[in-house]
Amino acid sequence: MKRLPKHVAIIMDGNGRWANEQGQDRLYGHYHGVISVRKVVEAATEIGIQYLTLYAFSTENWDRPEAEVTGLMTLFVETIAKEVPDLHKNNIKLAFIGNLDMLPNEAKKALADATQTTAQNTGLTLIIALSYSGRWELVEAAKSIAQKVANGALLVNDINETVFAENLTTCAFPDPELMIRTSGECRISNFLLYQLAYAELIFTETRWPEFRKEHLIQALLEYQSRERRFGKTSAQIQQI
């Protein structure tokens, strides 16, 4: 328990493929994926994870069939309205990252209400990446820094990793130490490109609708079995 990552990030992949395997449409998989979200949030809280980021919808996902996108937006609004009371009761704080201006007004209001309701909670911080793109985030950070330089609030020579991180949408959270992707795809798909620089990456064949507490524990055990050297040698790490 002393070697738990503070921050776990998950790419929740495989909803559509799982639904197709059940002979159902893709939205059927997304609805069952919500159950997995609930179970994993409960497990993360019980285990003692401090931050959990879930990749729910990428900017590229807007290019999916209109019916699926519309269904997903409806599902997001319904799920937030349904789950926020329990999240609040369990001291869980909600945060959202991404290009939220692209969301329908109903979804933006639901997100704002959920954020406000849980703002003072001190337990697990649940971060939902919605309409998110790592490249978009980096470009926005560069724009923000450039504007500060243009305004005279920042000198070019003062720009460093700390300053850059302060201009990311994740500036209030530590970087993830562990990233899990479900459904067997072995790539990070434009997710937290800056923040995952030193994260341990775990890819599982399990489809997201089937992902449960035991799968999270398996990933945590795999994480704890790895030696995290950050450029140092094994001998240097053992001396610390």
Image (tube, rainbow, N blue to C red):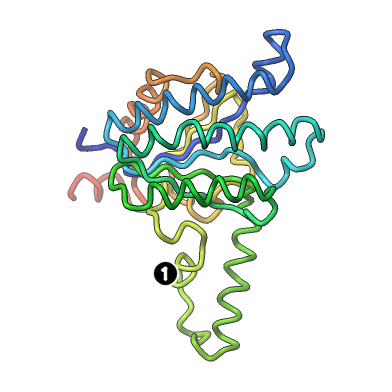
Location of residue 133 in the rendering, given as x and y in whole percent from the top left corner: 64, 51
Q: Which amino acid does label 1 sit on?
A: Thr
Drawn side of residue 165 relative to residue 217, left or right: right
Out of 171 and 94, give the one closest to the viewer.
94
Location of residue 183 in the rendering, given as x and y in whole percent from the top left corner: 59, 23
Q: In which quarter of the image is residue 161?
A: bottom left
Residue at the (42%, 42%) spot, across then down: 126
Callout 1: 10 Å neighbours few (<14), some, many (20+)?
few
Q: Residue furthest top?
A: 23
In what quadrant of the picture does the N terminus appear?
top left
Out of 169 and 90, give the one closest to the viewer.
90
- Label count reads 1
Q: In the displayed structure, would residue 147 be above or below residue 97? A: below
Residue at the (47%, 56%) spot, across then down: 170
Residue at the (57%, 67%) spot, across then down: 141
Q: In the displayed structure, would residue 182 be above or below residue 140? A: above
Drawn side of residue 64 relative to residue 18, left or right: right
Q: Give SS at disc 1.
A: helix
Residue at the (48%, 28%) spot, across then down: 37
Drawn side of residue 149 relative to residue 27, left or right: left
Location of residue 108 in the rendering, given as x and y in whole percent from the top left corner: 61, 50
The residue that label 1 is drawn on is 162
Q: Quadrant of residue 19?
A: top right
Location of residue 24 in the rendering, given as x and y in whole percent from the top left corner: 72, 12
Q: Residue furthest bottom?
A: 152
